[in-house]
Image: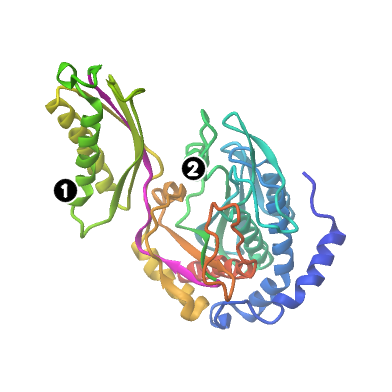
């Protein structure tokens, strides 16, 4: 791992010092939330946070391969005097900061992996990295903002470490690999970190995570209960009987049967589930069957995704999907094999924790605090939220004066760096307010 040379850090600090010296853009007066001393620490540290972000952005790494990023993080946490654990879930890094006063244990999480995307932002520090992914050469880019997450948490770690003696309780800094999914044939991410004993000897009383979004700069939003959807994949194979297309009665048509199954699946969220409880989606993304217009094929294969915000509803959908496909196929004389592969569960914010900590965020963001809209995207932070009371927040990064911005996962995704000190302030304030009030 090669760190940024000190002269480059100094130059960047001088170049950016005027940008952040007076206030944090997009934020309310947060002296009611953070003391003048903490606020000053964040302002002074912001150029370095920007520098970390640009360095990580320029050197992105795919899931379970975040070796350079993990090295940068581990070196930083060790320099802050923390107990540091590395190699968790392949490349995960954990720092443990014990405050000078007894109190609760709080965990903060940032994800480190990039995406197989070729960047097209035109930034001076844009990624030019290329690698192999699923047997193909691809570009690699931080097109989901995980570089921002890592830099923000590194900043919060430094601010909190510098006030260690006055800190109440213990803070666990979790730098997680492979949030976007592990490579084929590998385990990874939050689930593997927990499996390898992340919280075996020190379990948090609360955990907080953050994700940058293309909402207005400085907007902070959170939602109690289901904020991000579960994400399951399904494959359905309809087995019929091949025959001549002009004489379909001599066979069993799996294409017609598959069409009926498609409509039957859509009736599940539309007509069989309580629409007032939670929204759900069943989408078929691919149907494959047949090779010629005058031949009824033997089989049709379908694949798609299931999304919902409630784990009880999730189980009910799985059960209804299999029953629907099997019974429709049987009515046509065909058979249906349904395979559902579980992905991430729904990310469900703890109701009491969200109620207790939302005022902190509201004081911080002022009139830019919002109740988050549900998102059909999914997040493996859900595994942490299933283990300890957790709260996951969204941070807006859309530049001022820009009505629309390229979304996460776009090759042109380009979050405003003005969100970085806001993120550091949010994570720091959540720790300080929670530990003092508990």
Give the side of residue 308 with respect to residue 105, left or right: left
Seen in the picture, residue 378 relative to 418 is either above or below; the reply is: above
Q: Is 152 colored magenta in this rendering?
A: no
Q: Is residue 157 visible?
A: yes
- How many dots with numbers? 2
Local crowd size for mark 2, using a 10 Å CA cut-off: few (<14), some (14–19), many (≥20): few
Q: Which mark is residue 272?
A: 1
Are discs 1 and 2 less than 8 Å apart at CB? no
Q: Is 232 colored magenta in this rendering?
A: yes
Q: Nearer the viewer, residue 203 or 291?
A: 291
Magenta segment, which residues?
Answer: 217-240
Q: Position of residue 244 (x, y in %)?
A: 24, 17
Q: Earlier in the sequence, mark 1 or mark 2?
A: 2
Seen in the picture, residue 404 relative to 65 is either above or below; the reply is: below
Which residue lies at the image location 72% right of the left edge and 46% below the top edge? 128
Q: Quadrant of the C terminus?
A: bottom left
């Amino acid at each position: 791992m090669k760190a940024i040379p000190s002269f480059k850090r100094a130059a960047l600090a001088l170049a950016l010092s005027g940008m952040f010296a007076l206030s944090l853009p997009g934020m309310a007066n947060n002296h009611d939330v953070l003391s003048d001393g903490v606020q000053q620490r964040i302002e002074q540290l912001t150029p370095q946070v920007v520098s970390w972000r640009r360095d990580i952005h320029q050197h992105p790494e795919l899931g379970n391969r975040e070796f350079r990023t993990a090295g940068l993080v581990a070196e930083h946490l060790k320099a802050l005097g923390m107990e540091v654990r590395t190699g968790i879930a392949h490349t995960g890094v954990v720092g443990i900061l014990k405050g000078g006063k007894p109190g609760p244990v709080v965990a903060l999480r940032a994800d480190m992996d990039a995406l197989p995307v070729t960047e097209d932002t035109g930034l001076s520090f844009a990624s030019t990295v290329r690698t192999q992914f699923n047997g193909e050469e691809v570009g690699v880019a931080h097109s989901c903002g995980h570089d921002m997450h890592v830099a923000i948490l590194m900043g919060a770690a430094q601010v909190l470490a510098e006030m260690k003696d006055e800190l109440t309780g213990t803070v666990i800094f979790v730098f997680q690999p492979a949030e976007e999914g592990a490579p084929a044939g590998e385990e990874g991410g939050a689930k593997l970190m927990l499996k390898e004993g992340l919280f075996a000897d020190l379990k948090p009383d609360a955990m907080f995570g953050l994700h940058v979004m293309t909402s207005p700069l400085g907007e902070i939003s959170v939602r109690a209960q289901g904020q991000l959807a579960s994400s399951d994949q399904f494959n359905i194979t309809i087995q019929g009987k091949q025959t001549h297309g002009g004489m379909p009665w001599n066979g069993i048509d799996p294409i017609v049967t598959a069409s009926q199954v498609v409509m039957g699946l859509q009736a599940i969220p539309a007509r069989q589930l309580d629409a007032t409880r939670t929204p759900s989606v069943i989408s078929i993304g691919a149907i494959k069957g047949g090779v010629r217009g005058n031949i009824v094929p033997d089989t049709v294969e379908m694949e798609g995704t299931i999304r919902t915000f409630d784990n009880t509803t999730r189980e009910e959908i799985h059960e209804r999907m299999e029953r629907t496909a099997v019974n429709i196929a049987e009515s046509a004389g065909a058979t249906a094999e349904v395979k559902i592969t579980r992905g991430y569960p729904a990310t469900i914010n703890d109701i009491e924790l969200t109620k207790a900590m939302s005022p902190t965020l509201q004081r911080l963001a002022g009139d830019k605090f919002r109740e988050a809209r549900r998102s059909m995207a999914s997040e493996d932070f859900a595994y942490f939220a299933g283990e300890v009371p957790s709260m996951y927040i969204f941070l807006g990064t859309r530049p001022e004066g820009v009505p629309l911005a390229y979304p996460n996962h776009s090759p042109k995704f380009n979050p405003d760096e003005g969100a970085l000190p806001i993120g550091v302030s949010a994570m720091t304030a959540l720790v300080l307010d929670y530990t003092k009030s508990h």
